[in-house]
Amino acid sequence: MTEKQLHPQNIRHVVVAGGGPAAHRFTEAMQARGLDGWHITVLSEEAHLPYDRVALSKALTEPDVDLSLGETSLWEHAAIELKTGERVVRIDTNNKTVHTAAGHTYPYNELVVATGSDAARLSIPGSELTHVYRTLDDVWAINKSIKELEIKLGRPVNAVTIGGGLLGLEAAAGSAQLGAVPAVIGGGKWLMNAQLDEGAGQALGRLVAAKGLTVHNGVYPAAINSDDEGNVTGVLMADDRVIPADLVIAAVGVKPRDDLFRAENSQAENGTGQQFSLGPRGGVVINEACATDVPGIWAIGEVANFEGMCLGLVAPANTMAEIVADRLHNGEATFPGFDTATKLKLSGVDVASFGDAFATAEHSLEIVYADPARGIYQKIVTTDDAKTLLGGIFVGDATAYTSLRPLLGRELPAEPGAYLSAAGGSAPETELPDDATLCSCKNVTAGAIRDAIGGCGTCEGSDPVSDVTGLKACTRAGTQCGSCVPLIKKLLETELRKNGVEVSKALCEHISLSRQELFESVRVLGLSSFEEIMNKYGTGAGCDICKPTIANILASQNNAYVLDAGRGTLQDTNDRALANMQKDGTYSVVPRIAGGEITPQKLGVIAAVAEKYQLYTKITGGQRIDMFGARLEQLPEIWKELVDAGFESGQAYGKSLRTVKSCVGSTWCRYGVQDSVAMAVQLELRYRGLRSPHKLKMGVSGCARECAEARGKDVGVIATADGWNLYVGGNGGATPAHAQLLAKDLDDETLIKYIDRYFMYYIRTADRLQRTARWQEELEGGIQHVQDVVVNDSLGIVADLEAAMSQHVESYVDEWAETLKDPERLRRFRSFVNAPHEKDDSITFVPDERGQMRPATAEEKAAAAKEPVLIGASIPLRPGSAEPAGLLAPARVLEPAGSSELGATSRVRSRHTQETEV
């Protein structure tokens, strides 16, 4: 039974009207402070879990993206109840209940109103034909309309966005990504005039115009024109111009959803309710505790009017949510006022504004750098002595924002000009005070980060946190917009150094360079051996970290046979045997089955090999067939039969491309829109053998139903009616990640070109054993940086990356085919160095419950020693049964001198010895 059922009289009921980000943050804050004695009911009008409205632009271009906030387990808590599709329509303050449109009534002890705001509507003829940009349903409708109109018209859609602010520019940029011809109508003299001054607005206008966005500033629309069938044809302007339009999006601001309070005020006038104070421009008035005039009723987010202002930004809404949670737990937190800081990237253009950006404070000083030709504008606002930071604006280059934002209201550690990076300034290292807000979205201070690094005990366990991922999990900093992640990483490294923890990028104790630095040095100097690299950059004989890393780097750069020229002893266990070692000392055999496509004849070959060598068979998640139980000396025999039949190594043992999973695509499936199998085969044959910092997996789906689970792969390709959408940075495993959209509607040639660049950039810059998801996450700028490099060639290196991939493709050879050609290479595959013709008879199997075999346990081996069965014979069957009769046991066991580096027995396996001994 729940606590609510056991002690209903002791439970205080909190009802939250609204299910947006503010409601979610309040629920999280209550849970973090403890729910003993509380029950929370969240009434959400929308059918979705609370989602990140800041990221709506992603849902516009990527309708299947999951924008859900936080962990869904929050809503499974016994003391928390989320009701979707429940719109609150009335507050009954006298009876302390709320009523919903569905006819339900919910009693409360405390009511938190987080109803947010509605998109403002145009009051011009034809406004009913416009789309708005406010909710998931809104952006899905825009996406659908653009796609349908493009098919209907047979040309790109003219998409006009009315509104030159944050939402308007996001909507316009999103429509451009969907293939529309975008235009923006802004009534102000410049874009984003609520956040940017004229110089910054003009710079932004030039930058977005250069990216294909037409801007009409300084004039207002007068009507939306349409034909006799109600189809939009254009926007009539106040100056009588007509801007061609097939679709119009209105993003002209928001208005607080304060109708609950207005309705109750009407009741109060009739003597049946209580009166709420409302702001002149809407919103319910709150005090510094976020309480309304009526006891027990609180307001947070955009519906809350504080000091005459309602604001639709994440940070203040989150702060309000925390304050109410604190007050309900007998705290005394107060709302400090609105944090108006804004940072975003529009079509690759950095924009940031914070603090007193317009220098309204008396005697304030503006330090400005403007370069109209480059579209760069940077401004810092300080007190008249140029010491205390009051605000700033950055357009085109916002790198300084991350460092400056936490210093707002504090004395700058250097002169302001040092922070104007576009002018060549170089800001000094800054020690952030504990009370400086590092993550404004989650209201996390530098002190909270330091506490987590030292082991604060607020999370599960109290061990110190030593990486960015752990800090995100512990403090929630960096989990919303992500702009503070570089600063979190920098603070982490600083604190670790203070605590005596060496923060080193060194690959290991023998090599002081990072993997990225070592890779580049080897590439530039053309080094080709372990000895050359160690003589140049290392000390000592190397270790099990630098040896396989160097082997991997050399394989990535020259594609040479991995076990030749002294490289064999550098490899990891599996690479030395060109197979995956299993728990009993046997190996698995995994031939490549490109794209999961295989002929019946080749299936027959695998079946024959598995039967001949008595191998356990299993279909893998990557659409291949894995054969288990091969002894070391059997590997060449098995692979000869497979290679002769046209198979090649699937490289399941290497840090390289594993598989390209595919659905059947348009060839067979009635939903398929592209030939996903053909594309998967082409990709797998192109990138086979590509050595990388970690394993690589790919997927190709023939339609949006995503049967190949492409977004769970390092590189995922999903078919559209217009080409292919390319997703990057996904993985499964212990810390799964969804791949993010890199580019969309690509033709085959462009798709492959972008994948070439992405893989090579990852291979050159990732850390050792770092998956693409974590690498992408830790890059400053994240997916946007990857887009800039791969799609826009911001670093000017794509030609080099493409050439490197071409070299790999042209020089690829199958490792097992090459092994079988050379008797010297085959000498590696012996169970015993001192008895080359003997088999490792310590390996034994028993029949499993499903008609195959498995490794024998120690007890089963002991029992088998009394009645041995010769290896190589057929498994005997029980009389009258198709099941094996018993243990397949060794006939005898050799006990040679020596030891194995990697095996559990005392046998010397040739793959673990120095090459000179083999």
Image (tube, rainbow, N blue to C red):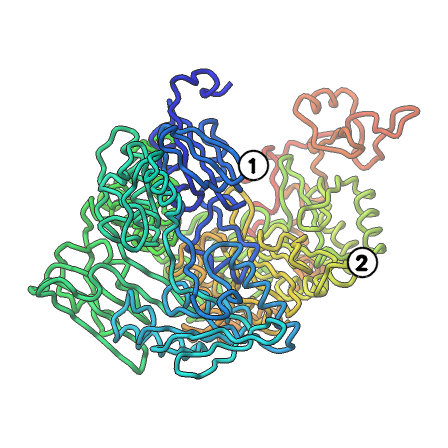
Q: Name the residue furthest front.
A: 270
Furthest-right residue in this view: 880
Q: Give the residue pinned by disc 2.
A: 645
Q: Nearer the viewer, residue 822 or 368?
A: 368
Query: Horizontal and vertical percent for residue 485?
Result: 34, 53
| Three-letter amino acid code at the position of disc 2 | Ala
- Residue positioned 68% across, 41% down in the render: 835
Instruction: Give the distance between the C-alpha atoms of the residues marked 2 and 1, in whole angstroms.
Output: 37 Å
Q: Residues within 10 Å of mark 1 (few under 14, many from 20)?
A: some
Snapshot quadrant of residue 613: top right
Residue 443 at x, y percent in the picture = 29, 46
| 471 with respect to 762 (left or right) | left
Which residue type does callout 1 highlight?
Ser
Nearer to the camera, 432 or 595: 432
**483 lies above or below 335:** below
Q: State which quadrant residue 380 falls in.
A: bottom left
Q: Which residue is mark 1?
A: 899
Say if residue 825 shows up in the picture.
no
Q: Is residue 383 left or right of residue 729?
A: left
- Foreground residue among 264 and 793: 264
Choose between 697 and 157: the one closer to the eye: 157
Compared to residue 421, the image places residue 471 above or below, namely: above
Count of numbered labels shown in the rendering: 2
Side (left or right) of 904 relative to 196:
right
As helix, strand or loop, the secondary structure at mark 1 comes to: loop
Q: Disc 2 or 1, which lies upstream in sequence?
A: 2
Height in image: 357 above or below 880?
A: below
Q: Position of residue 168 (x, y in %)?
A: 41, 66
